[in-house]
Image: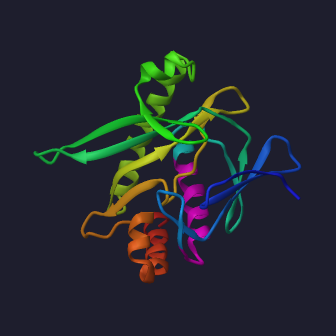
Amino acid sequence: MNNKLLEDGNRILLETDNEDELLLQFTDDLVDSRGHVKGNVKIKGSTSAQIAAHLYKVLSSYHLPVRFKNQKSSKELTVKRATLFPFYNVLTNAEDEDGAMTSKLEYVVVDEKSEEVVEIKALLKDDLATQAQLTEVRRYSLKMNVILKDFFHRRGLKLLGFKAHFGMLPNEKIGLCSELTLDSCDVKDANSRTKFTTTYMISHIDDAAELYEKAVSTILY
């Protein structure tokens, strides 16, 4: 049996017989921001895997390094083994009073008991990354935002934000090491109040399966 490296409700990361590869499994659970399971939608896992694989390929086509290797099954991805930084990024897009979009990038340090938003100087002070690494992470985060905003815009959607976790890939390069799914992206329909986010799915759980089907047909067309 493969050793389990991570389980957070939405996904399970397992070791494989290949020391350079890991197996990522997506679950059908709807998990809130506190980690509590609020329901189960039988197509959520396959929806997450399809969207994650597709967006990994989109970003890679723009020469952004990613840990993705291939989609192994309907709910599973094969990914490269990587060493993640002990922090992740949250990028938020918001409209100002004139309707122009502004972007805000935050860094969240993760430990066993809590998560804390910190400034770059705190990351440097605690030796969590070098200045060169943080510069690269920031560059990739902003590049992702440009690519993804355009990608979703062309599909009648607005990207309000996303969570991204970077790390060191086997080739010693910094790359995206987290999956972009409806659990990590804040996306809404540009012409209605419909949102394709976990919070929205939980509050509309009776319609969640239909919403996931609509998300796949819209995003992957």
Quadrant of the rendered structure where residue 186 is?
bottom left
Quadrant of the rendered structure where residue 63 is?
top right
The residue lying toward the viewer, choosing from 37 and 163, is: 37
Q: Is residue 88 above or below residue 184?
A: above
Whether residue 208 appears in magenta in the rendering, the answer is no
Q: Residue at x 16, y 44 (%)?
A: 96
The residue lying toward the viewer, choosing from 207 and 60, is: 207
Quadrant of the rendered structure where residue 25 is?
bottom right
Q: Is residue 204 left or right of residue 178?
A: left
Residue 207 place in picture, x, y as percent: 42, 81
Residue 68 place in picture, x, y as percent: 66, 47
SS majority, magenta: helix
Q: Residue at x 60, y 32 (%)?
A: 85
Residue 55 place in picture, x, y as percent: 53, 53
The magenta stretch spans which residues?
Answer: 39-58
Residue 10 place in picture, x, y as percent: 59, 61
Q: Residue furthest front?
A: 113
Q: Residue furthest left?
A: 98
On the rendered image, what quadrant is the N terminus found in? bottom right
Q: Residue at x 69, y 26 (%)?
A: 172
